[in-house]
Image (cartoon, helix red, strand yellow):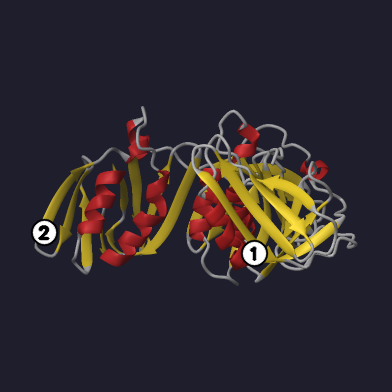
Amino acid sequence: MKFIISRQELAELVNRVQNIVAPKTPIPILSNFLLEAQDSRLILTATDLTVGVRCVGEAKVIEPGATTLPARRFAQLVRELTAMQVEISTNSKDVTNIVADASTFRVHGLPRTDFPGLPDLTGATKVQFTQGQLKDALYRTSFAVSKEDNRYVLTGVFCHITGSQAIFVGTDGKRLARTSIAISADAGSNFECIIPLKAVDEILKSLTNEDEPATLSVLADKIAVEANDTLIVSKLLSGDYPDVDRVIPSQSNCVVSLHREELTSLLRQVSLFTTEDNHSARFTLSKGEMHVNANTMDVGEGKVSMPVNYDGDRFDIAFNPQYFIDILRHSKNETVSLGFTDAYNPGIIVDGVYQPQEQELPNPLFVLMPLRLSEE
């Protein structure tokens, strides 16, 4: 194998795949990248046997072939190179020479035959999105998934595809994020799957062009997304995702509009007065005003307030302010709406204006579980 490639192109390819490589693995070949030179292209692949990424870049191929190279060391070397172009050649013993201007490096690799292939997607159900649609849906939901392994099915983003709609949900049991996209799928398409968070992170990194296509392919136990000459393939999480529709309030007795940036700033201030053992803040609504108060023995007390469009009786509810901040960070409008029924049922947060009498669920929709109110 022998080819010449621009350093910038090589660096971009390496950057797209390097996070897949596990820091420690009992299988040596999984610590390597697979490099394949063919038809004026360099194909770079990495896998940890759960998630795999393959990306394609332009190269001048002098002699087609393939080898594998130690991923971490190769990635570090590529970052340090300053030459405009890099020449890479491999002999029959998988020893690779890398030439960059006056610098020469020799790297010992492993045979290409040892590298596990990415799964075959023949027969997969395919759904087309624009990259902007898919990126927005995953961005707005993936932050809410569980980081605890004991809640296995909640450690990924739930995806439900019908013939006309794709619904994405992330939840850790304390907060929930839901969004939907109108699509045109194959007639009769109806499936559910749970995408691991690691795969979601890689998919988000690969999506860049708003209106360019992204193809999602699904098999019984695998999912793949192809966009921008990059293919991400992942095993799906197994298990039954909970019926999250049951925790989404069907009605809100009261809705208040809140300035997103102002509220974010105030909640950041208040969150400084919470601790890992006590991460509760009291939200008090009174005529024309909302007060937020956090009080802990270890730190002290923080009180903030802001004007709101509320004219009812005093109402108190407690939320985790950091969870609220996360939701605001994944909203985009100047104003968000907070809908609630009472202090014991979940609150709804909508990115924009919320009309409770509407039949359809707001999109996107965030749900925040209340905490126990402390005695004042």
Which disc, if any, is residue 2? none
Q: Earlier in the sequence, mark 1 or mark 2?
A: 2
Residue at 40%, 51% (x, y): give it.
Answer: 17
Residue 242 in sight here? yes
Q: Which residue does the numbered mark 1 point to in the structure image?
A: 133
User: Is 362 displayed left or right of 193 in the figure?
Assistant: right
Q: Residue furthest front?
A: 376
The kind of residue tagged 1 is: Gln
**Against 155, is 55 above or below?**
below
Q: Residue furthest left?
A: 102
In the rendered image, residue 167, in percent from the top left (x then y), is placed at 73, 53
**Against 335, is 341 above or below?**
above
In the rendered image, residue 376, in percent from the top left (x then y), is placed at 69, 41
Which disc, if any, is residue 103? 2
Question: Toward the viewer: 284 or 89?
Answer: 284
Residue at 46%, 41% (x, y): give it.
Answer: 117
User: Is 39 displayed left or right of 63 in the figure?
Assistant: right
Question: Toward the viewer: 94 or 279?
Answer: 279
**How many numbered marks does the figure carry?**
2
Residue at 63%, 62% (x, y): give it.
Answer: 331
In the rendered image, residue 107, in percent from the top left (x then y), is placed at 19, 45
Element type at marker 2? strand
Q: Decide: few, some or many residues near mark 1? Use Cα within 10 Å; few <14, some 14-19, many ≥20.
A: some
Q: Quadrant of residue 163?
A: bottom right
User: Is 363 displayed left or right of 9 in the figure?
Assistant: right
**Against 106, is 131 above or below?**
below
Element type at marker 1? helix
The kind of residue tagged 2 is: Ser
Depth check, mark 1 against mark 2: the one in front is 1
Q: Decide: few, some or many residues near mark 2? Use Cα within 10 Å; few <14, some 14-19, many ≥20.
A: few
